[in-house]
Structure formats: structure tokens, C-alpha cells
Amino acid sequence: MCKVMGVGSRSYYAWQKRSQQTKSRKCSNLEDKIQAIYFDKKQRYGSPRITAELLDWIYLNKLTPQN
């Protein structure tokens, strides 16, 4: 597959490793945000409300300019 795409095997595996590390970092950040919402709302929010809060947060985060 690497030969067909014109990519060295080392480059492919390095990219794959970076991709996995990024995914685990994103999951960790999401878990932290879920816990923050849960405890900020005095442990009264269930999954539907937490999901709504997360969607609002993600929308606002995309509107904020990143440096």
C-alpha cells in the first residue's frame, strides 16, 4: 500500500503513531470536560443535558479564534 501511494513505510508508521496519540489526547480532554460539566451542575445533569452543554461548548469553541 505504501508503494502504491508513494509513501515510505517509516513515514506511514510514524503518522499512524501520531494519529493514535492525538486521538487519546482528545478523548482525555473530552472526559475532563464532561466531568467539569457534571460537577459544575452539582451532579444533577444526566447524559442528555451534558450532551447539550458539550455541543454548546464545541460550537462556541469553533467560533473562538485560535492562535
Image (cartoon, rainbow, N blue to C red):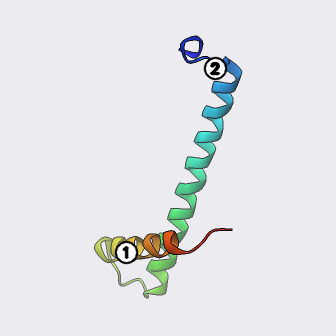
Residue 12 image offset from top left, x and y in percent? 63, 25
In front: 42, or 22? Answer: 22
Tell whether 52 sits left or right of 12. Answer: left
Quarter of the C terminus within the rendering:
bottom right
Q: Residue furthest left?
A: 48
Tell whether 56 sits left or right of 4. Answer: left
**Labels in figure, total:** 2
Q: Is residue 19 above or below residue 4?
A: below
Give the residue type that dot 2 points to. Answer: Val
Count residues near mark 1 (Cα–Cα under 10 Å), then give few for <14, some for 14-19, many for 20+: some
Circles 1, 2 touching at the beta carbon (< 8 Å): no
Residue labelled with disc 2 = 7
Q: CA distance from mark 1 to mark 2?
A: 42 Å
What secondary structure is marked by label 1? Answer: helix
Q: Is residue 37 above or below residue 47?
A: below
Q: Nearer the viewer, mark 1 or mark 2?
A: 2
In front: 43, or 5? Answer: 5
Give whichever of discs 1 and 2 has the lower sequence position. Answer: 2
